[in-house]
Image: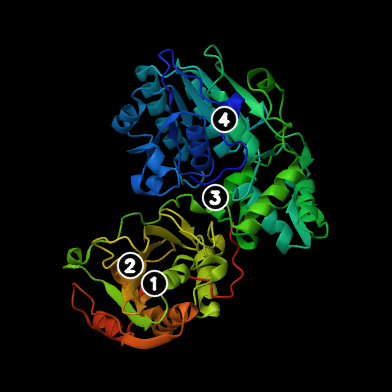
């Protein structure tokens, strides 16, 4: 397992307390593939827990470094049967699910899932529920997302199962959405016209301290059933947080002007334009900042001792996060959160295309580079590494996507050098990763495969496959883009982007192989495969031109897309 920063789970105060029969307790984590859950799970394993994860996509959970060490049950929190199965023989349940990107009706969805989990926990005789909620003031009107978190906490506290609701505010750590919003606002704008909430007092907390409290919560006495605020040692205004970041990043402090005209809706649009954080995530973050959020008491100190050395100061947390960015060692990131409404079905196998309209573009080049060298280029594509073709066209496509509410190019990627199933890479989602040397049905001859599923706003479904295959003394690069259009809009979209695809995909294939080594032989011309399924003049022409929707990605090789 990857070496972890503190807390590691090996700390004596955080170790699992054995059951009466001496066996290790079992922890169930809901939200194990999320930002906090992906970090908590390996630390629970280190602490001596037997860990089970409930995940919508078992393959994604299994792709994490800890995937082979814990039991995975596939299902969602509102699936009563899956939850009941996951609850068997469980001592402590961690509920780390939040509908950050859900649309209309998310409050009802949150309540339904929490009720399902609470009922199953009570029936299974679970000893404790731990829920990570949101820090909030009392007796004020809360934003819908904060209100939903409060309601979920109430459901667990009323369940009959002893529950500890940890209420945290802004979480500072590499890859957290809050940190990324602060980082990019400060990096990009030397002068900031900002909403009036920049003057509100906030008590941020380092992600390492959140993990400390989550681990400690499993050891709290069974009689405790309450909510408790958690926060770091500093109470700051939001503007002070941005300037604190500036100092740690070696930037000048920023002049900030609070403007009362910037409503949460307008401010989220502003954040969407200036930072990689899309509006769907920016809006609940901005709305949660409308009120001052500071710790009301330190009752948590009576339940869970503070970390050795005390809580992490804000600027220290920022410095640590920047260090992880520089070292490219980010454990988890907001970027990999699921996008509401994005396609989630896997690429159908070729025989399944019969009777359907599909456009493809296939490129094959031979290179003198070894398979491993070619694979290193493929697995690092996107983000700040770029897409090895027209920077301008990829950037334009990214801005088009953001303007219609998509995630756009600047979402970047968690790591520059590795990718796992479920990772986001700009406006793609990693659907499959097969390392070279592992022979499978989809990647024969010990080759490597990276398959990306499009999450941009398009009238259809799109995938991009990149392969590195052994070929004599060198290797062969295979690139296939696949687009299933949806209705007339999909066909018209295809025709609109068709003129650009020929040189975008050809250039991409050539530059990827060149980055590994100089291509020595063209194995196949860059022409598209014939459309499989319906016969139509538009499809036949598109196939001959060698272009496909899946080229609608973004970021050129030198694109300054942040990796966080």
The residue mark sitting in front, 2 or 3, is: 2
* Labelled disc at residue 447: 2
Taking the image as drawn, is residue 168 in sight? yes
Q: Which residue is label 4 attached to?
A: 214
Q: Quadrant of residue 507?
A: bottom left
* Labelled disc at residue 484: none
Q: Earlier in the sequence, mark 4 or mark 2?
A: 4
Q: Quadrant of residue 138?
A: top right
Q: Residue at x 54, y 50 (%)?
A: 334
Q: Quadrant of residue 220?
A: top right
* Labelled disc at residue 334: 3
Residue 301 in the image: state x and y as whole percent.
69, 21
Compared across the picture, whether 519 is left or right of 230 comes to left
Q: Earlier in the sequence, mark 4 or mark 1?
A: 4
Could you tell me how far apart the alpha carbons at marks 2 and 1 are, in whole angstroms?
7 Å
**Considering depth in this image, is 90 or 78 the residue closer to the camera?**
90
Q: Which residue is label 1 attached to?
A: 371
Q: Earlier in the sequence, mark 2 or mark 3?
A: 3
């Amino acid at each position: 397992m990857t070496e972890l920063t503190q807390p590691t789970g090996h700390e004596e105060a955080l170790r699992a307390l054995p059951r009466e029969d001496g066996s290790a307790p079992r922890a169930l984590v809901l939200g194990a593939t999320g930002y906090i859950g992906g970090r908590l799970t390996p630390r629970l394993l280190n602490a001596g827990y037997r860990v089970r994860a409930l995940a919508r996509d078992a393959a994604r959970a299994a792709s994490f470094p800890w995937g082979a060490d814990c039991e995975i049950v596939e299902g969602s929190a509102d699936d009563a049967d899956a939850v009941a199965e996951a609850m068997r023989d469980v001592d402590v349940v961690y509920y780390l699910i939040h509908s950050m990107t859900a649309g209309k009706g998310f409050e009802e969805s949150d309540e339904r899932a929490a009720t399902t989990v609470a009922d199953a926990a009570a029936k299974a005789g679970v000893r404790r529920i731990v829920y990570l909620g949101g820090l909030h003031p009392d007796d004020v009107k809360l934003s819908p997302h904060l209100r939903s978190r409060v309601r979920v906490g109430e459901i667990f506290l009323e369940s009959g199962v002893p529950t500890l609701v940890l209420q945290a505010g802004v979480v500072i750590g590499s890859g957290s959405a809050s940190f990324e919003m602060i980082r990019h606002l400060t990096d990009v704008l030397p002068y900031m016209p900002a909403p009036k909430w920049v003057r509100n007092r906030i008590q941020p907390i380092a992600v390492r301290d959140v993990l400390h409290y989550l681990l400690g919560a499993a050891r709290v006495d069974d009689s405790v059933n309450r909510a408790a605020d958690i926060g770091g040692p500093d109470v700051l205004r939001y503007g002070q947080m941005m300037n604190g970041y500036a100092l740690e990043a070696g930037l000048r402090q920023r002049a900030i002007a609070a403007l009362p005209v910037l409503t949460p809706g307008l401010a989220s649009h502003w954040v969407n334009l200036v930072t990689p954080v899309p509006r769907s995530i920016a809006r609940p973050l901005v709305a949660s900042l409308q009120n001052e959020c500071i710790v009301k008491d330190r009752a948590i100190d009576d339940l869970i001792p503070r970390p050795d050395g005390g809580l992490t100061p804000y600027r220290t947390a920022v410095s640590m996060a920047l260090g992880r960015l520089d070292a490219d060692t980010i454990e988890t990131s907001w970027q990999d959160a699921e996008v509401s409404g994005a396609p989630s079905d896997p690429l159908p196998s070729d025989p399944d295309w019969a009777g359907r309209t599909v456009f493809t573009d296939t490129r094959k080049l031979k290179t003198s580079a070894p398979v491993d060298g070619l694979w290193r280029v493929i697995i690092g594509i996107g983000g700040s590494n770029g897409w090895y073709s027209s920077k301008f066209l990829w950037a334009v496509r990214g801005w088009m996507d953001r303007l219609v509410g998509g995630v756009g190019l600047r979402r970047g990627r968690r790591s520059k050098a590795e990718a796992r199933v479920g990772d986001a890479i700009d406006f793609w989602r990693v659907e499959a990763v097969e390392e070279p040397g592992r022979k499978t049905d989809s990647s024969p001859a010990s080759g490597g495969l990276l398959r990306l599923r499009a999450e941009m706003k398009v009238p259809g479904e799109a995938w991009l496959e990149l392969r590195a295959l052994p070929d004599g003394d060198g290797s062969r690069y295979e690139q296939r883009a696949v687009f299933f259009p949806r209705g007339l809009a999909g066909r018209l979209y295809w025709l609109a982007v068709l003129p650009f695809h020929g040189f975008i995909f050809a250039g991409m294939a050539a530059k990827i192989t060149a980055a590994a080594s100089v291509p020595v032989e063209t194995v196949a011309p860059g022409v598209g495969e014939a459309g499989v399924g319906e016969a139509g003049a538009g499809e036949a022409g598109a196939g001959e031109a060698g272009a496909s929707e899946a080229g609608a990605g973004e970021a050129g090789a030198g694109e300054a897309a942040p990796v966080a």
